[in-house]
Image (cartoon, helix red, strand yellow):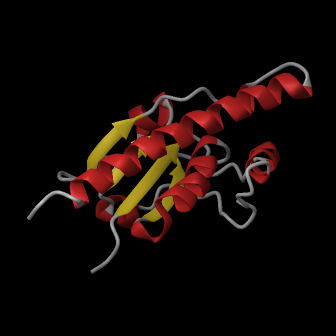
Amino acid sequence: MDKPIVYFLCTGNSCRSQMAEGLGKAILKDEWAVHSAGIEAHGVNPKAIEMMDEINIDIRNQESSIIDRDILSNANLVITLCGDAKENCPVIPVGVETDHWGLVDPAKAEGTEEEVNKVFRAVRREIQNRLEVLKRKINQFIDLPK
């Protein structure tokens, strides 16, 4: 049996969705196939790489890509991370569960380096917390008697 697919979608697939993909792979392990994409592909943001390095998750080899209709069609769960992705995502096929997390774009953070880092860390922590909740929900569902 193929693994269920979770697909994180954002505008440029450079920060939020890249961090979500890296965290998803770390938290959901081999239970799910974890992918990310954007309405556009802007490349992986160097600050996202730096912030993920802080928690020992390497996202350097992840690719920034546009939405793949095959992955979208086969996804079990599609999570949009910003309003732009939610509004402009191609039509999600019937039967694919969706969720919208609506996270701040850390790439637009301004101020000192520490102030920018604080925004990235807050977004990273929010993604991590939501993924931990998702994993608990999945495990509860799996543990239900047949």
- Image quarter of residue 21: bottom right
Residue drawn at point x = 39 percent, y = 64 percent:
71
Please identify the residue farthest to the right as the structure is shown: 112
Please indicate, yes or no, whether residue 16 appears anywhere in the rendered image: yes
Q: Is residue 141 left or right of residue 107?
A: left
Q: Number of marks in the image?
A: 0
Residue 99: x %, y % from top left: 35, 38
Q: Is residue 6 left or right of residue 36?
A: left
Question: Where the N terminus falls, by quadrant?
Answer: bottom left
Question: Where the C terminus falls, by quadrant?
Answer: bottom left
Residue drawn at point x = 47 percent, y = 28 percent:
83
Please identify the residue farthest to the left as the structure is shown: 146
Instruction: Give 132 or 126, whichever is nearer the viewer.
Output: 132
- Image quarter of residue 4: bottom left
119 shown above or below 37: above
Please identify the residue farthest to the bottom as the structure is shown: 1
114 shown above or below 79: above
126 shown above or below 145: above
Residue 126: x %, y % from top left: 56, 33
Residue drawn at point x = 56 percent, y = 42 percent:
128
Instruction: Give 71 or 27, whichever is nearer the viewer.
Output: 27
Q: Is residue 26 left or right of residue 83?
A: right
Q: Is residue 134 left or right of residue 35?
A: left
Residue drawn at point x = 50 percent, y = 60 percent:
35
Please indicate, yes or no, whether residue 90 appears anywhere in the rendered image: no
144 shown above or below 102: below
Residue 122: x %, y % from top left: 66, 29
Residue 90: x %, y % from top left: 36, 47
